[in-house]
């Protein structure tokens, strides 16, 4: 991500097949990156075009000013997919 943009970073955890996955979600309104930290490292990033009236948020607000894409549960699912893709290599 662009280092000049103020981002938010949230620690996330979930389990898959009894394995604890630790990672983090780094995001701002138009980009986000999910990083798997444990049991091994991996990442996946996404971007929204500036012209699209949408923004990424951790949890949806009560009165949004535009369409919001909630990342709370989505980031945990992405963490699982990073893990599963790499153990099946």
Image (cartoon, rainbow, N blue to C red):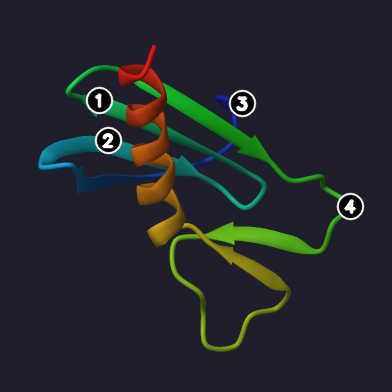
**Residue neighbourhood size for the residue with mark 3, other residues' Cα within 10 Å, grouped as few (<14), some (14–19), many (≥20):** few
Q: Which mark is residue 59?
A: none
Which percent across, then down, holds residue 86? 37, 18
Query: Which secondary structure lies at badge 4?
Result: loop
The residue at which mark 4 appears reads as: 51
Residue at the image point whose x is 39% and y is 11% from the top: 89
- Of mark 3 and mark 1, the one earlier in the sequence is 3
Calculate the distance from the C-alpha at mark 4 to the C-alpha at mark 2: 30 Å
- Of mark 1 and mark 2, the one earlier in the sequence is 2
The residue at which mark 1 appears reads as: 37
- Of mark 4 and mark 2, the one earlier in the sequence is 2
- Of mark 1 and mark 4, the one earlier in the sequence is 1
Residue 40 drawn above or below residue 60: above
Residue at the image point whose x is 10% and y is 42% from the top: 18
- Of mark 3 and mark 2, the one earlier in the sequence is 3
- Residue 54: image quadrant is bottom right
Calculate the distance from the C-alpha at mark 3 to the C-alpha at mark 1: 21 Å
Query: Which secondary structure lies at badge 3?
Result: loop
Q: Is residue 27 left or right of residue 24?
A: right
């Amino acid at each position: 991500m662009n280092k000049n943009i103020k981002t938010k970073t949230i620690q996330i955890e979930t389990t898959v097949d009894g394995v604890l996955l630790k990672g983090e979600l780094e995001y701002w309104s138009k980009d986000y990156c999910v990083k798997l930290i444990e049991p091994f490292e991996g990442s996946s990033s996404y971007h929204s075009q500036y012209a699209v009236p949408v923004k990424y948020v951790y949890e949806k607000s009560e009165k949004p000013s535009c369409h919001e894409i909630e990342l709370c549960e989505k980031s945990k699912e992405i963490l699982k997919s990073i893990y599963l893709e790499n153990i099946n290599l």
